[in-house]
Amino acid sequence: SCCGLWREEFRQGTTGAAIIIRHMTSADHVSDRMPRAILLAAGAGTRFGGGKLLHPLDDGAAIAAHAARNLIEAGLDVMAVLRPGDFPLAELLESEGCTVTKCPDAAQGMGVSLAHGVSMTADAAGWVVA
């Protein structure tokens, strides 16, 4: 941790993935703004054969639900970026506690979706991208 400004906390998500959370420790650098999570969910999943994020894992929960839960468990507000018209995924992520936004130009690639997510959360102190 540079200059003692950060304290790291390690957690384990529901799928066993390690989550590292960094907290500022100096009151001089703390603001009311918090980091936000951007869940990139606008891809078509074509290499998977389509519908990847709705595919259930062994416990029956969709891949997207696991991703959202891990971010929320880390204490983050989650902005999920979807392609227009993906109503089943939007409904699932909203039910998991995510805010959903549709990226009209998602077909142009992940960078465009990420830029959209950042623009929708411009007040954040930083971003965790998943």
Image (spheres, helix red, strand yellow):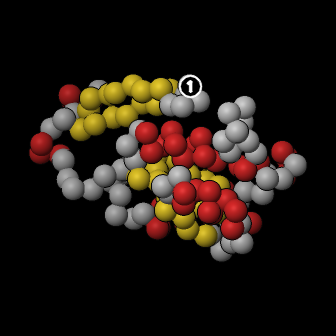
Q: Position of residue 8 (x, y in %)?
A: 32, 28
| Total numbered labels placed on residues in the image | 1
Of residue 59 and residue 110, the one placed in the foreground of this image is: 59
Q: Nearer the viewer, residue 61 or 22?
A: 61
Residue under the point 65% across and 74% down: 104
**For residue 57, side relative to residue 116 (left or right):** right
**Residue placed furthest toward the left:** 28
Percent position of residue 122, x then y = 39, 65
Q: Which of 81 and 63 lies nearest the eye of the viewer?
A: 63
Q: What's the residue type where badge 1 is placed? A: Gly
Residue 74 in sight from this viewpoint: yes
Residue denoted by label 1: 16
Q: Residue at x 66, y 41 (%)?
A: 61
Is 92 placed left or right of 109 in the picture?
A: left
Q: Position of residue 100 (x, y in %)?
A: 54, 64
Please tell me in which quadrant of the rendered image residue 21 appears.
Answer: top left
- Tell me: 28 left or right of 77: left
Which quadrant is the N terminus positioned in? top left
Coordinates of residue 105 in the picture (x, y in percent): 68, 71
Q: Residue at x 15, y 38 (%)?
A: 26
